[in-house]
Amino acid sequence: MRYTVEDGGRLNNFAVEPKMYEAKPPTATEKRNYIVLGGVAMALVAGLFALAFVVS
């Protein structure tokens, strides 16, 4: 565990930092999946608005 000793003998503990990594750009398949899921989400929201309009 990483720690430093401050003046007066107190220990100061630091959290272990995770390793950094570079994000990869999405592939063509992932982009297509994002578009499909976005369309499904928009259809769900539009359906809920339509249902709320019909019920009220």
Image (cartoon, helix red, strand yellow):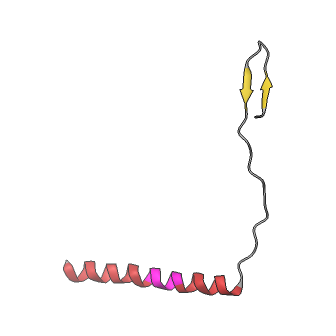
Pick the quarter of the image with the N terminus.
top right
Q: Is residue 19 above or below residue 11?
A: below
x 79%, y 64%: residue: 22
Q: Is residue 18 magenta?
A: no
Q: Is residue 12 rendered to the left or right of residue 33?
A: right
Q: Which residues are magenta?
A: 37-42
* Residue toward you, 40 or 5: 5
The picture quadrant where one finds residue 29 is bottom right
| Residue 39 among magenta residues | yes
Above or below: residue 53 compared with residue 23: below
Residue lying at the far left in this picture: please name it: 56
Q: Quadrant of residue 8?
A: top right
Residue shown at the point (80%, 26%) measured from the top left: 4
Q: Position of residue 11 (x, y in %)?
A: 74, 22
Q: How many marks?
A: 0
The secondary structure that most of the magenta stretch takes on is: helix
Please name the residue shown 65% across and 83% down the image: 31
Work out which residue is located at the far top of the displayed protein and give it.
8
> Residue 34 in the image: x percent, y percent?
59, 81
Residue 27 quadrant: bottom right
Locate residue 30, reporting x and y percent: 65, 82
User: Measuring 54% from the left and 86% from the top, which residue is drawn there?
Assistant: 36
Q: Nearer the viewer, residue 47 or 32?
A: 32
| Quadrant the C terminus occupies | bottom left
